[in-house]
Amino acid sequence: MKKKILIAVTALFICAALITGGIFGGLTAARNNRLKISNELTGLTGEYKNVILLIGDGMGKNHMKAGEAVYGKDFEMRTRAVIAGEAMTFSQSLTGPTDSAASATALSTGVKVNNGEVARHKGENIKSNMELAIENGMSTGVIAAEGVKGATPAGFSAHADDRNDLDDILGTQLISNIDLFMGGAKEYYDEHAEKIQNAGYTYFSDMNDFDNSAEKLWGVFDELPTDSAESSSTAPTLAQISVAAIEYLDEKSGDNGFFLMIEESYIDKMSHSNDMEGMLAHMLAYNETVNAVLDIAEEIGDTLVIATADHETGGLQYNGELAADLNNKMFTKTHHTKANVPYFIYSKIDGVPETLNNTQIAYICRYYITNRQAA
Ligand SMILES: [Zn+2]
């Protein structure tokens, strides 16, 4: 009898091991197959002096559609695009959707990493497009509504094993030689103001103190309002700081051009908490920012603008509801999903397929950062 139990238990263990091994092996194989999807593109043409990449954190296709129901017409983010399609967002992590650190790294370096890693994989830094732009003599800037310590701006301006290593993120940003940092989280940065100034940045929290002649700028605000009617010099909108940053970088860069990343951080946050009203306010603020950036980019000319998202958040469903009928229950999840996200390119460039790997967006930026006329 005892022997029989022993055999049964042993068989159970072997079965469990086989099943676990099978699942793990299957996940690994699926992950490795995904990672074989190209990170590069062939057939890109032309040259641009300046490159601007905008990221709506957590923005899926339905976030846009719901926003447009409120806006009463299609977003300029959509209507002004010359090329539109969708981007795959998976990270190197074995299970689940990407987080913002891995997707920012993909969009900034063209390399897929594990969730949580910031332009770094298994302890090795990965060169970002910001670093490449600096090597090419371009001026550079990083803007994030929530503050530049967030995973998305960090993926473009820092290196860290983990997105929560805020000291590493700030430490690497301070030696990055990036010309301009701007965004929220004033309270956090005020504690580090001396360190930031010692690194050569002019630290300010009022747009009246925005010094166009400063060598390097670090602007911080409490909370950026989504409505421009509520903005002030100490609480500007994302669109307003983006336009000021572009004017500064354009002036500073002379003939060398600039590379700027702008993130609307709260579409994601509001979607995590299934807050439809809050999400919509930030969705409209993101469209307003893209529209304002396109206006000034047209004015200065020779500027490639791309707008996209890092991943979808909230599993948002949309089936043609009118503005008055939009509600929190249209969110089906409180976390990120694997859904593809929209991308828009505002210049005619050849060789861009409708469905992209998000690393190929980094590749496009990299192509125009490196393929430059001798200035
Ligand atoms: Zn998120």
Image: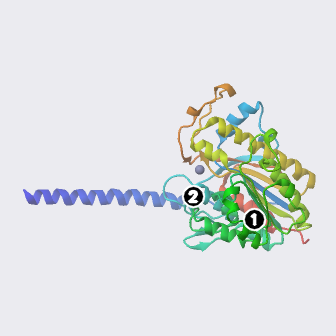
Tell me which amino acid carries mark 2: Ser
The quadrant holding residue 45 is: bottom right
Quarter of the N terminus within the rendering:
bottom left
Looking at the image, which residue is at 21% across and 58% down? 11
Element at badge 2? loop
Q: Is residue 40 above or below residue 198?
A: above
Classify residue 25 as left or right of residue 218: left
The residue labelled by disc 1 is 366
User: Label for residue 91?
Assistant: 2
Q: Quadrant of residue 278?
A: top right
Q: Is residue 262 visible?
A: yes
* Residue type indicated by callout 1: Arg
Image quadrant where one finds the C terminus: bottom right
Q: Outermost residue, left direction?
A: 1
The image shows residue 292 at horizontal and vertical percentages of 84, 46
Question: Disc 2 or 1, which lies upstream in sequence?
Answer: 2
Is residue 353 shown to the viewer in this render?
A: no
The CA span between labels 2 and 1 is 20 Å
Taking the image as shown, residue 193 lies to the left or right of residue 95, namely right
